[in-house]
Image: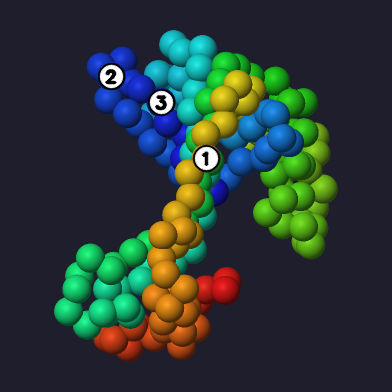
C-alpha cells in the first residue's frame, strides 16, 4: 500500500492509503468517484505517491538500559513525483484492476475481471484511474547505518527474540 498525497483547494494536504501498481515508470491507483481526494486532483496536473516499508522499531534498552537516545526505527521509503492524469475509461480501469489483483491476489481465486460481468461492471464505472508518470523518485532509508557492529548485534538479538519488555509479540523479516 502507498499514500497518495493531494492538496485541497485551501492548501491542506489530503492523504489516502491505497493499493497501487508500478511498472518502473508509471504508477497507477484508483479512487471511487466520490472520494474526497478526487476533487483537488481534478485541479492539479502533478501528484505525489509515497511507499514505505517499516521494518522494525527498537527500544533504547535493547542497547543501553539507561540511555534513551538508543531508541531507533528501521525503514525504507520511496516518493514518486510527476505529472498525473485522471481517467474514467472503463477499459483502462479494467486493465488496471487486472494488474492490481495480479499483484495483491496472485493465486487468482476470483472470477476473471470483466467489465461485462455484472459483479464487476457497475463497480468499474464508479472508479477513476490515476496515473502518475515518475518524473522524480526520491528514496530514504534508515537501516542502522551508524550503529556499531556490537550494538547492531544486540538489537538483532532482541528483535529475533520477538518480544518487547511488555510481552507484546511481533514479527520481522530479518
**Does the residue at mark 3 contact the one at mark 1 (Cβ under 8 Å)?**
no
Query: Mark 1 — residue?
Result: 139
Query: Mark 2 — residue?
Result: 11
- Foreground of the two, 113 or 164: 164
Q: Is residue 80 left or right of residue 169?
A: right
Horizontal and vertical percent position of residue 140: 48, 44
How far separated are the C-alphas under marks 2 and 3?
9 Å
Horizontal and vertical percent position of residue 57: 38, 67
How far separated are the C-alphas under marks 1 and 2?
25 Å
Q: Please rate how many residues cluster around mark 2, counting C-alpha atoms within 10 Å: few if below 14, some from 14 to 19, many from 20.
A: few
**Does the residue at mark 2 contact the one at mark 3 (Cβ under 8 Å)?**
no
Horizontal and vertical percent position of residue 54: 46, 58
Query: Mark 3 — residue?
Result: 6
Which residue extends farthest left? 66
Question: Going 70% across and 20% down the picture, which residue do you hit?
Answer: 89
The quadrant of the image that shows the C terminus is: bottom right
Give the secondary structure at mark 1: strand
Amino acid at each position: 500500500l502507498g499514500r497518495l498525497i493531494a492538496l485541497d483547494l485551501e492548501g491542506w494536504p489530503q492523504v489516502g492509503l491505497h493499493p497501487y501498481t508500478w511498472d518502473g515508470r508509471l504508477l497507477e491507483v484508483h479512487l471511487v468517484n466520490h472520494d474526497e481526494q478526487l476533487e483537488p486532483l481534478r485541479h492539479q496536473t502533478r501528484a505525489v505517491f509515497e511507499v514505505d516499508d517499516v521494518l522494525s522499531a527498537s527500544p533504547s534498552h535493547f542497547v543501553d538500559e539507561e540511555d534513551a537516545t538508543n531508541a531507533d526505527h528501521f525503514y525504507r521509503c520511496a516518493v514518486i513525483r510527476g505529472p498525473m492524469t485522471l481517467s474514467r475509461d472503463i477499459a483502462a480501469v479494467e486493465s488496471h484492476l487486472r494488474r492490481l489483483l495480479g499483484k495483491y491476489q496472485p493465486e487468482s481465486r476470483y472470477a476473471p475481471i470483466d467489465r461485462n460481468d455484472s459483479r464487476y461492471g457497475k463497480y468499474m464505472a464508479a472508479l477513476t484511474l490515476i496515473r502518475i508518470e515518475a518524473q522524480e523518485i526520491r528514496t530514504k532509508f534508515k537501516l542502522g547505518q551508524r550503529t556499531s557492529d556490537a550494538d547492531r548485534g544486540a538489537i538483532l538479538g532482541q528483535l529475533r527474540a520477538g518480544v518487547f519488555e511488555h510481552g507484546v509479540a511481533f514479527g520481522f523479516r530479518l
